[in-house]
Amino acid sequence: MKMDIKKKIDELTEIINYHNHKYYVEDDPEISDYEYDMLMKELIELEEKYPDYKKEDSPTQRVGGKALEKFNQVAHKVPMLSLSNAFSEGDLIDFDRRIKSVITENIEYVVEFKIDGLSVKLTYENGIFKLGATRGDGQVGEDVTLNLKTIKSIPIKLKENINVEVRGEVFIAKDKFEQLNAYQEEKGLSLFANPRNAAAGSLRQLDPKITAKRPLDIFVFNLEWIQGIEFKSHSESLEYLKSMGFKISPNYKVCKNIDEVIDYIKYWQDNRENLKFDIDGIVVKVNDLEQRRKLGSTAKSPRWAIAYKFPAERKKTKLLDIIVQVGRTGTLTPTAVLTPVKIAGSTVSRATLHNEDYIKQKDIKIGDMVIIQKAGDIIPEVVEVVFDERDGSEIEFNMPSKCPECGEKTVRIKGEAATKCSNISCPAQIRRGIIHFVSRDAMNIEGLGESIVTLLLKENLINDVADIYYIKKEDLIPLERMGEKSAQNLINSIEKSKNNDLSRLIFGLGIKYIGNKGAKILANHFKDIYELMNAKEEDLVKLEEFGSVMAQSVVQFFENEKNIKVIEKLKNAGVNLKSLKREDGSVVRIFDGMKIVLTGTLEKYKRNDVKEIIEKFGGKVTSSVSKSTTFVLAGREAGSKLDKANSLGVKVIDENTFDNLITLKTKEEVENYIK
Ligand SMILES: NC(=O)c1ccc[n+]([C@@H]2O[C@H](COP(=O)([O-])OP(=O)(O)OC[C@H]3O[C@@H](n4cnc5c(N)ncnc54)[C@H](O)[C@@H]3O)[C@@H](O)[C@H]2O)c1
Ligand SMILES: [Zn+2]
């Protein structure tokens, strides 16, 4: 029994950490916020009951995700925390009581909109915008200065020459979000799940030109730090920030007591539909800054603030039908077809029913009047049946015993909620799997979007991901809207993808629970796909951040004969199956993960060539020197960067040393050489 609980806690920790990564790092959540919050609730409850089993890397103790390597990392002077949550009036009254147990004098609260976007910190030196960073894990974020500069509501120069750091929320207004998705659709690009993901994805683009095209906006909600000025209260500091040119949280209010707070919350709960942007709650903050200091923070959130999250908006409508959709992993998801209703700002005609158990527990039947709700995330759900309105004509729903796409038997694995199609060559699974395989973070085959994949499947030109590498130009030209030139372009990008690093291929295979990050860990550890194929569960759990769920999933994937066949076909087509890092051939990732700064005038190499070499070998060229810089390659007349490297004790090498480095065979050799 005890063992089972430990195992459950381990598993929940691993799964939630996986979803955190998808949400915070990849901006590509796989499950709805509802499902996420349920997993989290389960974990919090278990940890409270069995604190001994709480894991060190428990998501209940940490803020957000990790900063992406592709950006320069920024250590936060003041940590960027999250907020604890309140879901009811009772929670707010408890919050007030906790505050009063520490603070005996009068307490004022400030209430502000909780905007559902992405948290950023802006640093100004002498009134000039110098640095902008994301929250990351709260300690280290990403440098997104150039991208933030494209947001018109962020002042580049303040009214006075002050040194200040502020925090705000980057978001996309509702109508702008609709327009953005309409544009994406028109261009055949993938749609954003909700404004939050659109904002996060747009801000974390490597190319600021893309960010500039996205309708991002900001509200500044906190003064983090300022030189030479003392404020007494939060509201005073907000007004000051406004006078300096910042766009601050609109409609904020100073409340004399918790009752006024509750009134404000009630008002906006009913009227938020009229706002131009989405809010998912109200943040309540102690106004007096001295009182705030007394209250302090936990590792995850300040004690002087709480986020009241609005309950999802609910509406009544008729459930006309239940249809079943098949996902990439073969999971059958029942979806309710509804009489359209307007809810939380948009018209809803579909809602998720999650799985078979959900429908049984709630006793949902076709023809029922149901209550649906929509929360901060965009996926609406059916919450309950209005039993009073049943007239006996309602029809019971059963999960189909045959897959709606291919007609094969469906199965439900014991202990799991999901019903799955048992056919590994199910067309629905295949289509979704191929779309995933060619996507940007996987094999990145440009010009092979959803519509062309569907077309190729229809024309029987492909049946699995490996077939992509056997397509001929002559096959493509006769296709609708194709033509000679685009056919050639497509063939070129398919060809190019053959040389991808193993990590892209592993990710592209779509192994359950193996996201971008898991794939990279695997590719760094195993020499080639064959070594990975032969790995046992006990080998895999030893890897960083791998638990039994991920390990088993990998083993199961390679137990499937069909998958092995696909890999043989990939091999015969000449797709790279080796990890570049350990390959004995030409490309060795000897600079894997290293951050390298170039400075001064180089004599032997053009800067771009050096950059290309470094990147090919797995390193990254960054623009500024910091403690995390691996080494600086300095040419003639190197200036301030060289000084900075010397003062930080960062290794500096010249071009001759660089010549020697690139003849080395492994990363370890490089590390020893520059030690
Ligand atoms: N679907 C998934 O897979 C998935 C995964 C992870 C997280 N999530 C969702 O994200 C939530 C947790 O995210 P979080 O840690 O960012 O916490 P949060 O969104 O619950 O609240 C904290 C954030 O609110 C923001 N904020 C907006 N207005 C503010 C204001 N006026 N004052 C202060 N802060 C303000 C800040 O950026 C702050 O970081 C979860 O509850 C879940 O719904 C979903
Ligand atoms: Zn099927």
Image (cartoon, rainbow, N blue to C red):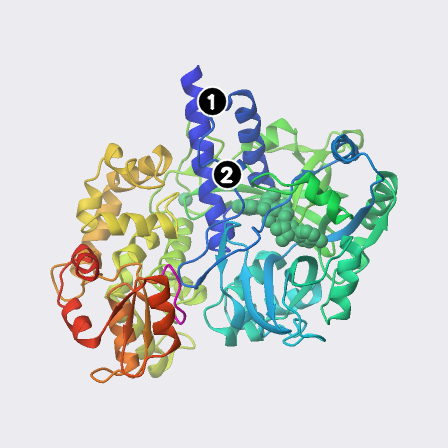
Where's the N terminus, which quadrant? top left
**Is residue 622 within the magenta segment?**
yes
- At horizontal 41% and vertical 67% (from top left) the residue drawn is 452
- At horizontal 33% and vertical 82% (from top left) the residue drawn is 484
Neighbourhood count class around disc 1 (C-alpha, 10 Å): few under 14, some 14–19, many 20 upward:
few
**Is residue 269 within the magenta segment?**
no
Q: Are marks 2 and 1 in contact (CB under 8 Å)?
A: no
Q: Would you say the beta carbon of the disc 1 residue lies within 8 angstroms of ligand 1? A: no
Quarter residue 297 falls in: top right
Question: Does dot 1 land on a helix, a strand or a loop?
Answer: helix
Q: Position of residue 392 (x, y in %)?
A: 74, 29
The amino acid beneath tag 1 is: Asp
Query: For ligand 2, which image quadrant applies?
Result: top left
Please say whether residue 415 is visible from this viewpoint.
no
Q: Which residues are magenta?
A: 621-628
Mark nearest the camera among 2 and 1 is: 1
The amino acid beneath tag 2 is: Pro
Quarter residue 669 falls in: bottom left
Please say whether residue 571 is visible from this viewpoint.
yes
Q: Position of residue 530 (x, y in %)?
A: 17, 47
Q: Which residue is mark 2?
A: 59
The prevailing secondary structure element of the residues shown in magenta is loop
Image mark for residue 52: 1
- 95 is higher (above) or lower (below) than 2: below
Looking at the image, which residue sits at the far top?
1
In this view, the residue in front, 499 or 564, is 499
